[in-house]
Image (cartoon, rainbow, N blue to C red):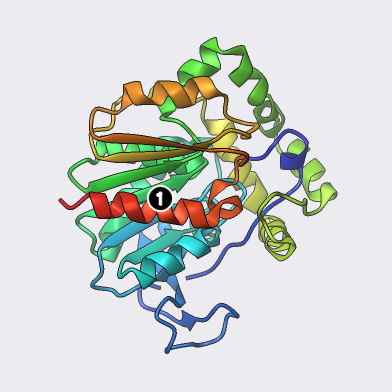
Amino acid sequence: MWTSPSRRTFLKLGATAVVGATSLGSAGTASAAEPSRITRLRIPTPAGTFDAVAAGPRHGRKVLLLHGFPEFGIEWEHQLRALAAAGYRAVAPDQRGYSPDVRPTGIGNYRLDHAVGDVRAVADALGWHRFDLVGHDWGAAVAWIAAAKHAHRVRSLTAVSVPHVGAFAEALRTDPAQQEASKYMDFFRQPAPLPENEILASGPPELPGVPPEKCAEYFRRLSEPGALTAALNWYRANDFAGHEQRVAVPTLFIASTDDPMVAPSGVEATRNWVTGPYRLEILEGIGHNIPEQAAETTTTLLLAHLASVCS
């Protein structure tokens, strides 16, 4: 998601990726000696081929990480490297609309149920029967629903910034603070190309915790034909209603005190939507962009949560 004025400009970095592919060091060059190197993947599914980035040994415990708007899979760069160093196999796909080969036309193709289906399809393509699921922003919304629907496959959930979709929908209905915080969505939901033109004319923004080169790269990739419309179609297609299944898997929810898009009511109410082991961590003085603004803390909490879930 984007903030009121600052979300009307841009953000972070994506990547391309074949199940198998090239090893990249931090500078983007081959680096076989680096244990936490990031690899580009392309993941074929019935919906199309997803670009992704991955790190870690192929035999390691599987972790799937879902980005938000307007990020790409490389949002999780810090976490990918740390997971790899700890022996996990971590994959962060560019979600539908962000991967050029999974960019269907039509707003309805961006309903959350389709993105949840993508989680299952990507896991199937990777040969993952069981995996841990991590999501931020829209990725968190997808992850909440996927963890509820596919508890037999999702070992644990780590959701960042966005509450359980049921709690968030309730806050949108009843909490003036959340209604005010979500007004930026009205701008994004205008018919194309009205918001697209304004966003693209604004250029890359400066965002807390995001290096300028990442902001520029996100802007460049979302400036490609059809990319921004597809990303905004997530807003046009979804009102967050109808996703009321509770989550039974062990869950970590990382929220923050200075998030301009998420009011405390939904964060607090999320505990009512989790029936399994649940932990809430609220980071002081951090905004919406938790995985990058508080990269070390996010990674530490994620690794501890994964270590606590053994089944």
What's under tag 1, amino acid-wise? Leu
Q: Against 166, is 114 above or below?
A: below
- The residue wearing badge 1 is 301
* Outermost residue, front side: 284
Residue at the image point whose x is 49% and y is 51% from the top? 96
Residue 241 in view here? no
103 vs 63, left or right, is right
Q: Position of residue 166 (x, y in %)?
A: 40, 23
User: Looking at the image, is 19 positioned above or below residue 253?
Assistant: below
Q: Is residue 210 left or right of residue 274?
A: right
Quadrant of the image for the N terminus? top right
Above or below for 129 versus 161: below
Q: Is residue 304 visible?
A: yes
Q: Residue 114: percent from the left, percent from the top?
A: 40, 41
Where in the figure is residue 6, as x and y percent of width and height? 75, 41
**Numbered disc 1: secondary structure:** helix
- Asked whether 261 or 40 is in front, the reply is 261
Percent of width and height locating residue 254 = 45, 40
Residue at the extreme right of the image, as rendered: 201
Q: Residue at x 77, y 44 (%)?
A: 199
Q: Residue at x 17, y 44 (%)?
A: 152
Rendered position, 32 above or below 182: below
